[in-house]
Amino acid sequence: MKPIIEYSNFRQYMRDFYEERKLRHVFSWREFSKIAGFTSSSYMKVVCDGKSNLSRIGVERTGQAMGLVGFEMDYFRAMVKFGQETDEVKKKAAYKEMLSIASIHKVRIIEGELFKFYETWKNPVLRELAPLMPGATPGEIAKMCYTEISANDVKQTLDFLTKAGFIKKISENTYIQSETSITGSPEATRLAIRDMHREMAKIAANSLDLAKTERNFSGVTMGISKDSYEQIVKELDECRRKIISIAAGDKNINQVYRLNLQLFPLTRKIKENGNE
């Protein structure tokens, strides 16, 4: 079983603990629940299935049942907060606490770099731009960005991207991309990318001042049902897939673009009962 600080999902950690314990000797969900001090014989399974949450006391009992002590218990507490918290600020704070504990104990969590990657528009933009400008200085790269950025910011961003493995430095001021895409665990990715969506939405608004030959904006306001929403989302996913394919096959790249596909509600749902 992997060390706990290589996990970001506490339910998966609990399930892996259960499966490994079961391989060693007879071990059931009933016994797991009993050791943790829960009266319900299936409580641990219910939690692992995502059908129930752990209370503050439940976290302590469960951690003790799995033999967690010291920094491992601290990490488990933070991981449960991250998994159960609905408030975005508190959820992000819990995740950063996990990263801090992992960093102190010399363990790299790929979502940690991913989380930082999406904290600012500079990272994805320079990851695309720097490889297009071999030999360019940070100052020269900065001048190519429509959104204001200093040469020092460019240097710091490139240093982070290189250290985190998002790009490779092959010679002085010359970089290549390490991979064509960046992925992480679904939950961490969803949380991390929210900040990026906010920043890119602001940049998109500013780009309205560009010439129409360089930007394309369109939109439609419509009333739809849940079924239509799901169908539209599928069409958008397919559209995005095709666009990525077109971009991936481009051999003459000379500019970095951002595509925002946005479908969002402008009103709350109207209740089915017209009298309400």
Image: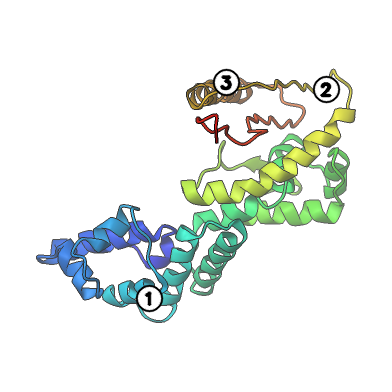
Q: Is residue 205 left or right of residue 114?
A: right
| Earlier residue among tags 3 and 1 | 1
Which residue occupies the foreground of this view, 130 or 12? 12
Q: Nearer the viewer, mark 2 or mark 3?
A: 3
Q: Nearer the viewer, mark 2 or mark 1?
A: 1
Amino acid type, callout 3: Cys
Q: Nearer the viewer, mark 3 or mark 1?
A: 1
Residue 185 in percent (x, y) is at: 47, 49
| Residue assigned mark 1 | 57
Could you say which disc has been placed on residue 254 in the image?
none
| Earlier residue among tags 2 and 3 | 2
| Residue assigned mark 3 | 239
User: What is the quadrant of the N terminus in the image?
Assistant: bottom left
Give the quarter of the image for residue 214: top right
Q: Residue at x 74, y 47 (%)?
A: 122
Circle 3: is it few (<14), some (14-19), or many (20+) Cα within 10 Å? Answer: few
Residue 138 in percent (x, y) is at: 83, 49
- The residue positioned farthest toward the left in the image shown: 26
Amino acid type, callout 1: Ile
